[in-house]
């Protein structure tokens, strides 16, 4: 006998109205409303900072911002999620990170100003449907939503590629996480009903329909191990070490994206065994991402599911960014009728696992997976059925976004 899983964070159609009313109560005046979605990556993990290929979708869950112009250069902002308020001055020289959620707003404003955008003071109220720390990119969503809002108030032309790049620079330079551009790009460029095959070197894209006979079920492990950021940066260092060594026999390579599996295997003796495994994951994951886009577009759901399983095994064994809880979710999911594939998704060391499930089996699958995971760990996971939604943009109330 199964029971329904613990509910996940559900999209809230009323959030824009509630945020507007709360803004008026908190700051006064009539705000503009903007929103930016989280994302889930279907396949192509830890390839973006190696100039590789990824296949994310923007989610139906968003971070929302209500924003109004001030007459000075101060920015005041409050998060309804954490119930905290902060402020800063746009004229502050070389601001230092505070190592909390405010860095995503402060850092992005600093990066946008440094890029030549003359921002204006603003009051902001922020709320989110995206569970924080789940690996669904709540950080990129807050960057893109507030960035879009600040640029709009300043009357600046909005280049979505430039906005995504500014978000990545915020993470890399201001916050200190050496991430790639996938999260911000997906949040900016999401298209309903489609995944985005993104070439992270030149930002070339191909839209891939996700199909209607299956669903992507995302299970949040509800754990986030403390060493995530440092291990993430270590993996990037390891990849760069591999590139330096391989360049001695493969002149002209710039990143692991430029290396074939045959070339890598021929050079195995040159590499430390750990570095070789890290490189092997990236090289094979790039090939899987490209193949996955083809089979998904062709409607080969079983083929896509098999690639998901291969991806998880590589992330677990070669890249070593999985954890016991994610492995349990994946192994359990693959044993439930209706599942065609499963893998961890996101940076790893906690967060979410994603499963490809036949549409007619989604409800039963979700209930069984949640029950088995809670029985084994004592932790009740949150579950969502991911839908590919639109990217960043204005909110409702006549501003051009139909919720």
Image: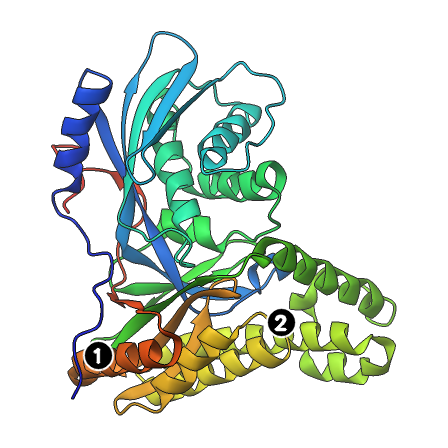
Q: Identify the image quadrant of residue 301.
A: bottom left
Q: Nearer the viewer, residue 91 or 28?
A: 28
Above or below, 106 against 330 in this view is above
In the rendering, at what x and y percent does residue 314 appear? 57, 80
Identified at 26% across, 66% down, the residue is 384
How many residues crowd around disc 2 within 10 Å: few (fewer than 14), some, or many (20 or more)? many
In the rendering, at what x and y percent does residue 4 appear?
A: 17, 75
Is residue 264 in view?
A: yes
Q: Which residue is mark 1?
A: 367
Question: Quick check: 399 above or below 250?
Answer: above
Which residue is disc 2 drawn over?
282
- The residue positioned 67% from the left and 77% from the top of the image is 280
> Given the current orientation, which residue lies at the most extreme top position?
71
- Judged from the image, the secondary structure of the residue bearing numbered disc 1 is helix
**Cα separation between marks 1 and 2:** 33 Å
Name, please, the residue furthest toward the front. 378
Compared across the picture, whether 8 is left or right of 121 comes to left
User: In this view of the protein, which residue sits in the foreground, 253 or 119?
Assistant: 119
Q: Position of residue 174 (x, y in %)?
A: 59, 36
């Amino acid at each position: 006998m199964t029971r329904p899983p613990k509910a996940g964070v559900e999209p809230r159609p009323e959030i824009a109205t509630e945020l507007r009313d709360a803004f008026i109560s908190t700051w006064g005046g009539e705000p503009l409303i903007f929103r930016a979605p989280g994302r889930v990556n279907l396949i192509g993990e830890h390839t973006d900072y190696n100039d590789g290929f990824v296949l994310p979708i923007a989610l139906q869950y968003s971070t929302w911002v209500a924003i109004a112009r001030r007459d000075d250069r101060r920015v005041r902002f409050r998060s309804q999620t954490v119930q905290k308020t902060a402020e800063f001055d746009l004229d502050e020289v070389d601001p230092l990170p505070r190592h909390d959620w405010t860095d995503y707003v402060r850092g992005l404003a600093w990066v946008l100003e440094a890029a030549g955008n003359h921002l204006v003071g603003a009051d902001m109220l922020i709320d989110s449907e995206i569970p924080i720390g789940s690996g669904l990119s709540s950080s990129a969503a807050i960057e893109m939503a507030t960035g879009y809002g600040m640029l709009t108030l300043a009357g600046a032309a909005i280049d979505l590629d430039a906005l995504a790049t500014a978000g990545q620079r915020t993470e890399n330079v201001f916050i200190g996480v050496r991430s790639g551009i996938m999260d911000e790009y997906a949040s900016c460029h999401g298209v309903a009903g489609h995944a985005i095959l993104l070439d992270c070197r030149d930002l070339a894209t191909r839209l891939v329909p996700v199909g209607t006979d299956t669903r992507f079920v995302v299970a949040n492990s509800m754990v986030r191990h403390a060493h995530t950021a440092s291990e993430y940066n270590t993996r990037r260092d390891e990849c760069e070490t591999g590139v330096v060594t391989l360049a001695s026999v493969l002149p002209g390579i710039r990143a692991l994206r430029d290396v074939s599996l045959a070339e890598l295997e021929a050079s195995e003796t040159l590499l430390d065994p750990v570095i070789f495994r890290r490189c092997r994951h990236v090289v094979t994951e790039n090939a899987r991402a490209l193949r996955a886009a083809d089979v998904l577009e062709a409607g080969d759901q079983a083929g896509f599911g098999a690639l998901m399983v291969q991806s998880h095994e590589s992330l677990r064994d070669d890249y070593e960014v999985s954890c016991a809880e994610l492995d349990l979710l994946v192994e359990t999911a693959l044993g439930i009728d209706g599942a065609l594939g499963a893998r961890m998704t996101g940076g790893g060391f906690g967060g979410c696992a994603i499963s490809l499930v036949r549409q007619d089996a989604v409800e039963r699958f979700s209930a069984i997976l949640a029950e088995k995971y809670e029985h084994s760990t004592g932790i009740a996971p949150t579950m969502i059925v991911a839908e590919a939604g639109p990217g960043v943009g204005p909110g409702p109330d006549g501003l051009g976004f139909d919720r």
